[in-house]
Amino acid sequence: MERAPAGLKGRSFLSLLDFTPLELRRLLNLSARLKARRRAGGAGGLLAGKNILLLFEKTSSRTRCSFELGAAEEGARVTYVGPGTSQFGKKESLEDSARLFGRFYDAIGFRGFGNHETVRDLARFSGLPVWNGLTDDDHPTQVLADLLTIEEHARKPLAETKIVFCGDTRNNMAYAWIYGCARMGMRFVAYGPRELAPDPAVLARAEAAAPGAKLSFSDDPACLEGADVIYTDIWASMGEEDRVAERVKLLAPFKVTEESLARTGNPDVLFMHCLPAFHDFETGFAAEWRARGLDIREVEDSVFRGPRSVVFDEAENRLHTIKAVMVATLAERADSVFSEHSG
Ligand code: CP
Ligand code: NVA
């Protein structure tokens, strides 16, 4: 029988680099069990009586819904504080706000501007476990969901998997993948323009935490060869909307196309994307830019909708993995989910 994620209770989930491969393995196993239990109509209640704050400075669909629904299914109460609706960061400092939240809640899910120090300080001043739902330089709950998705589809162990991240390799998703691959022993290639190569400090941090990590950068499409996963993300992240035009110029050669998939030489290659994605002109944003003469799509529609795409499996797995993070770090009796649902 598998064991519960021992030692995770009371901990924050700020970055995948903070966890050992065994701890991440246990979180993935717990996610798979919670997913199976939900599909079988099994009962929740693992977070009964807990009070959770969702403090979101940036917009969200998947992450917010996963936290809210996951918490509700396990019996917790949630307060959602959305962008621009609290004193946080404007009339009240991070420290004072965190001290307040520490008096009311049992844990905080945070999405916002800022970086690792922001979420670390939120945890420090509140005294609570903090779950990082995206910052400017990380998005660990997304990569946890992606790892589960790869395991569900791939025909080889994670440690033998090669992922090529195409496009803006200096953003939060690329960095979350660098940390995730370093931890799980996966080969990671950042494929994009030199101007947007990963910050060397990020690579150094990952390599210091996981010596021997297989991380590299390339602007040569030959790096796609042998890939098991082609991953991409939007070209201008939240807060970077004023950079769209310059990004399109730099990143257009790195758009994911049918040709990119063919170049891998792997008929089983997976196409992955954290979403939301620009793959057609059905959003006001993409349509407005097209009217101004720019194609902002980071992936071809046929790839996005095609047989190698697992993007909505990833999206569903956000719920199961975020629930696992909440249960492992907050539940009084996380062990019971293993004994009751083993096998
Ligand atoms: N992938 C992701 O984090 O989606 P949302 O921005 O909708 O939460
Ligand atoms: N890089 C994107 C990820 C969205 C989930 C952003 O920060 O907007």
Image (tube, helix red, strand yellow):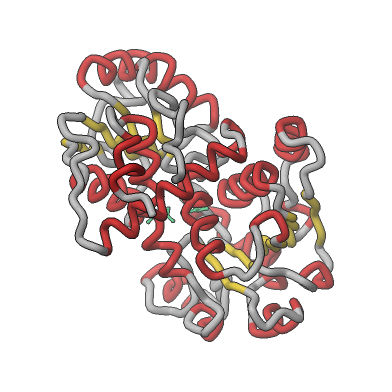
Q: Where on the picture, by quarter, is residue 253?
A: bottom right
- Left or right: where 20 falls relative to 102: right
User: Can residue 38 be spotted in the picture?
Assistant: yes
Q: Residue at x 33, y 38 (%)?
A: 327
> In the image, residue 304 lies at what x, y percent?
51, 78
Identify which residue is drawn at 79% across, 36% down: 211
Q: Which picture quadrant has residue 55? A: top left
Q: Determine whether 255 is above or below 325 in the image.
A: below
Residue nearer the viewer, 288 or 200: 200
Question: What's the residue at 34%, 38% (across, down)?
Answer: 326
| Residue at horizontal 76 percent and vertical 53 percent from the top | 195
Q: Position of residue 290 (x, y in %)?
A: 49, 77
Q: Nearer the viewer, residue 155 or 269?
A: 155
From the image, which quarter does the C terminus lie in?
Answer: bottom left
Q: Is residue 16 left or right of residue 337?
A: right
Q: Quadrant of the N terminus?
A: top left
Question: Looking at the image, is 197 positioned above or below residue 79?
Answer: below
Left-right relation of 246 to 135: right
